[in-house]
Image (tube, rainbow, N blue to C red):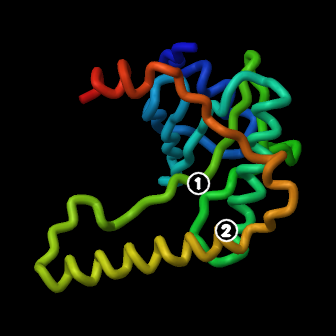
Amino acid sequence: MEHTAKPRNQVMEILAAWDVGAVQAVVDIHPGKVYKVECVTSTYYVLKNIGENSPKVVQRFGFEYDVLCHLDRTGISIALPIPDREGELLVLKNGYLYTISPYLTTNNKWLELDPDGLKRLNHNCGAAIARLHMALAAFPAEDLENRTWKTVFPEDLFDHWIPIIQ
């Protein structure tokens, strides 16, 4: 299904489920799916449309949330979804489910480094990836085969679609 950008008033109706305060700006990051929300208090959020309301989408979200909580407990910086006014993590609006989470920022944008700084950055990135791998490896494996899913690619992926992209 093709998603298109929602008018600001529709996004504001969705945001009304959370106590985010007065909104200054809404930036459509991925049309109809992901929005950056800037509040007048200089607080930023990410509003996500995670899909049509269905048991499959709810189940997927539950698993993803469990993984995020596990990573958070292991010390990995995670932007956990924020409960709405009623304590729910998923908000249903017009047949779609939405979550909101803090917008994570970085001071590394457009960072220019000398060779030693680049070495430190690469080392730190590698160390962060290693911590993430170790944390994911420690995730409880019980019943994973029933909680995870496989992406089924179209049969003509390699013969047709990848050459088109190239």
Residue 46, placed above or below residue 114: above
Q: What residue do we see at 80% from left, 64% from top? A: 141
Q: In this view, does 42 lie to the left or right of 142?
A: left
Q: What residue do we see at 33% from left, 81% from top? A: 123
According to the image, label 1 marks what residue?
102
Q: Nearer the viewer, residue 139 or 116?
A: 139
Q: Closer to the N terminus: mark 1 or mark 2?
A: 2
Crowd band around label 2 with a 10 angstrom C-alpha radius: few (<14), some (14–19), many (20+):
many
Residue 163, placed above or below residue 78: above
Q: What residue do we see at 86% from left, 48% from top? A: 87
Q: Position of residue 162 (x, y in %)?
A: 34, 28
Q: Position of residue 55 (x, y in %)?
A: 85, 29
Q: Is mark 2 on a helix, strand or loop?
A: helix
Q: Does residue 86 appear anywhere in the picture?
A: yes
Q: What residue type is labelled 2?
A: Leu
Q: Which residue lies furthest to the left in this view?
A: 114
- Tell me whether the residue at label 1 lies in contact with that at label 2, contact meaning CB atoms closer than 8 angstroms: no
Q: Which of marks 1 and 2 is in front?
A: 2
Q: What residue do we see at 49% from left, 40% from top? A: 36
Q: In this view, does 93 lie to the left or right of 134?
A: right
Q: Position of residue 86 (x, y in %)?
A: 88, 43
Q: Nearer the viewer, residue 36 or 95?
A: 95
According to the image, label 2 marks what residue?
71
Q: Which of 92 and 159 is in front in this view?
A: 159
Residue 107, placed above or below residue 123: above
Q: Which amino acid does label 1 sit on?
A: Pro
Q: Is residue 151 left or right of residue 58?
A: left
Distance from Cα at disc 1 to Cα at disc 2:
16 Å
